[in-house]
Image: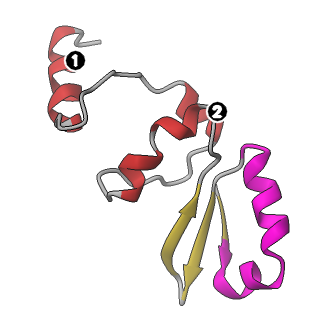
């Protein structure tokens, strides 16, 4: 995941969105603090975008290909993602 400042983003947002459309995740920072994470709207990262937006998970130096290797669990809207993941781990303790 690449990181750019708000100032860099404001100079050419179209170029940043073009990078995201190609599958790159981009963190936007202000004074060194992450204020936004831009994720591609389709593909593997689409699955995790709602969790990132709600602050339930944080992406570090992950790439879209890293996200594609993560497990996929179908959950109801009101389900606890962490509880489901822990239950999955108990069933398959690799």
Alpha-carbon neighbours of circle 1 within 10 Å: few (<14), some, or many (≥20)? few
Please state which of residues 51 and 69 is positioned toward the viewer in this rendering.
51
- Looking at the image, which residue is at 36% across and 48% down? 51
Rendered position, 28 above or below 37: below
* Boundaries of the magenta span: 4-23
Residue at the spot of label 2: 65
Mark 2 / mark 1, whichever is N-terminal: 2
> Could you tell me which residue is drawn at 77 percent across and 65 percent down?
16
Q: Is residue 19 above or below residue 83?
A: below
Q: Please give the residue where the numbered disc 1 appears in the rendered image.
A: 88
Under circle 2, the secondary element is helix
Identify the image quadrant of the C terminus. Answer: top left
Callout 2: few (<14), some (14-19), or many (20+) C-alpha neighbours within 10 Å? few
Quarter of the view holding residue 67? top right
Q: Main secondary structure of the magenta part?
A: helix
Instruction: Judge whether residue 22 is colored magenta.
Output: yes
- Residue 7 location (% of width, % of height): 71, 88
């Amino acid at each position: 995941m690449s990181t750019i400042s708000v100032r860099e983003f404001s100079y050419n947002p179209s170029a940043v969105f073009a990078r995201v459309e190609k599958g790159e995740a981009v963190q936007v920072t202000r004074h060194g603090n992450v204020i936004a994470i831009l994720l591609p709207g389709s593909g593997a990262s689409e699955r995790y975008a709602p969790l990132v937006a709600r602050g339930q998970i944080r992406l570090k130096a992950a790439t879209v290909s890293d996200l594609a290797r993560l497990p996929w669990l179908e959950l109801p809207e009101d389900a606890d993602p962490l509880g489901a993941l822990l239950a999955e781990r108990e069933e398959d303790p690799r």
